[in-house]
Image (cartoon, rainbow, N blue to C red):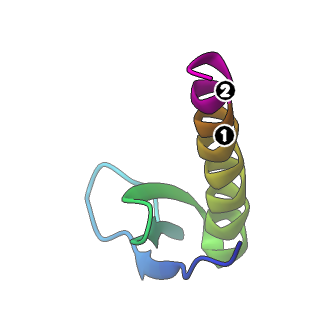
Amino acid sequence: MNNGVLFERVCEPDFPPGYYYAHVPSLGLTTHGLGVDGAREAALDLVGLWLAEKMTDVASHG
C-alpha cells in the first residue's frame, strides 16, 4: 500500500523550531516530528497504527 505524504514546516509559536507536519491526505491523517526525517518516522508509525486498528475492526466484525 502506497500513500503520499505532504511535509509542511510548522510555523506556529507553540512549536519549537525545526518541526514539520506530515499529512497523509488519502487517509485523513496528520502528525508531526522534528525535521522531515522525524515527521516521516511519525507518519510511518501513525499509518501503521491506523492500519492495525482497521484490521482489528475487520476481524471483530467478521
Please provide percent x and percent y for residue 24: 47, 68
Callout 2: 10 Å neighbours few (<14), some, many (20+)? few
Q: Residue at x 30, y 71 (%)?
A: 11
The circle on residue 4 is none
- Which residue is found at the position 48% from the left and 54% from the top? 31
Q: Which residue is mark 1?
A: 49
Quadrant the C terminus occupies? top right
Q: Quadrant of residue 61?
A: top right
* Label 2: which secondary element: helix
> Rounded to the nearest whole Å, what is the CA distance between mark 2 and mark 1?
11 Å
| Mark in the foreground, 2 or 1 | 2
User: Which region of the structure is painted magenta?
Assistant: 56-62
Amino acid type at mark 2: Thr
Say above or below: 60 vs 55: above
Is 56 or 15 nearer to us in this picture? 56
Considering depth in this image, is 57 or 39 the residue closer to the camera?
A: 57
- Apparent side of residue 48 relative to residue 34 in the rendered image (left or right): right
The residue sitting at 67% across, 69% down in the picture is 40
From the image, tell me which residue sits under label 2.
56
Residue placed farthest to the front in the image? Answer: 62
- Please state which amino acid type lies under the numbered disc 1: Leu
Magenta region, mostly helix, strand or loop? helix
Residue placed at 59% from the left, 76% from the top?
3
Expressed as whole percent of the image width and height from the top left, the position of residue 7 reads 49, 80
As drawn, 37 above or below 58: below
Label 1, secondary structure: give it: helix
Instruction: Bin the neighbour count of mark 1 within 10 Å (Cα to Cα): few under 14, some 14-19, many 20 and up.
Output: few
